[in-house]
Image (cartoon, rainbow, N blue to C red):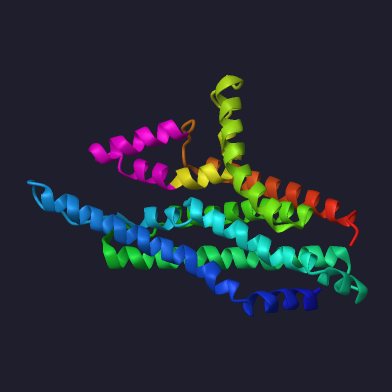
Amino acid sequence: MLNLIRGEFRKIFTSKSLIVFLAIPVGLSLLSMASERILFEVVNSISEGEKVVYTTDLGYVLLSSVAQDAFFIVMSVFLAIWNVKDYSTGSIRNMLARGCTRTNIYFAKYLVSMVMVVMYTVVNTLFSVLFSFIFSKVIGTLTVEILGLYLLDIFMVIAIATTYFSVIMMFQKLAPAIIINLVSGGVLGIIISIIQEVFIKNEKINLNTLALETIIQRLPVKVLSEQTSSQGGSLTQVLAQISDQLMKPFEVNSTFILHMNIVCVFYIAIFLTVGFLVIRKKEY
């Protein structure tokens, strides 16, 4: 098992795709922050009012660093590239002939994939924060609550990556795996929202929390809206409107965090098991 894990890491770290995997979200973060600063300067230059300083909230930057569609697109594509290669080239037969079991191969690939996903998430966040300091005046502090929500974000990313990995291993073909992974998140969110609005009458039941990608994208706006609610102003009003329109409102507290951790465990257990049961029956 350890040899398999080392082998999987070796294949990834010696691949040029790793540089691309880490560079794309960093480049997008740079482009996003630079364009926002330029837009702010343009609007501010034509305004007749008092000049203001462009600021960003540290907690918001931290949480929003994993709340972009491009973040998940890149992750799904490269997880497919790394894990499908052995099957498309026929290398899997050689691995089995050397005495490696399907179980060891499956879980070695999974463990390495999740390590890469965590590294990808942290690197993307570090550069997002760096670019925020370069292009804006960063306000706010890193509180225990924000750090806890960021760790929850990482856990949700791992759960989403597990679903991607399961689909990849079940199909073992690049194009179908990528397409299904890219489409499934949005479709699931829409289906859950429809069920919530049409069939769920109990206000205490919020099925939208099952759509992890939606929660990740909504959490930064929700937290920033709650932090600034006491200050009033147009920014708060806009954020509140967006928050209410996206999905049924939820309160960010310890109960919510516990609930989302349980949902993540459920996703990981179900999809990891289903993927394993499917690959056990495949012939190579």
Which quarter shows the C terminus? bottom right
193 left or right, relative to 34:
right
In the rendered structure, the answer to whether residue 54 lies left or right of residue 92 reads: left
Which residues are drawn in magenta? 220-246
Q: Relative to residue 265, is residue 189 depicted above or below?
A: above
The image shows residue 8 at horizontal and vertical percentages of 72, 74
Answer yes or no: is residue 106 visible: yes
Question: Quadrant of the image for the N terminus?
Answer: bottom right
At horizontal 68% and vertical 67% (from top left) the residue drawn is: 82
Q: Is residue 178 magenta?
A: no
Residue at 82 percent across and 55 percent down: it is 276
Q: Position of residue 45 (x, y in %)?
A: 12, 53
Drawn side of residue 53 relative to residue 79, left or right:
left
Q: Is residue 179 above or below residue 116?
A: above
* Residue under the point 47% across and 52% down: 68
The image quadrant that residue 263 belongs to is: top right
Q: Is residue 10 above or below residue 191?
A: below
From where the camera sits, is residue 232 visible? no
In this rendering, the answer to whether 95 lies above or below 274 is: below
Count the marks. 0
Tell me residue 130's x, y (percent). Answer: 36, 68
Secondary structure mostly seen in the magenta stretch:
helix
Q: Residue at (40%, 61%) from the top-left corner?
A: 29
Residue 84 position by quadrant: bottom right
| Residue 75 horizontal/vertical position (percent) | 58, 59
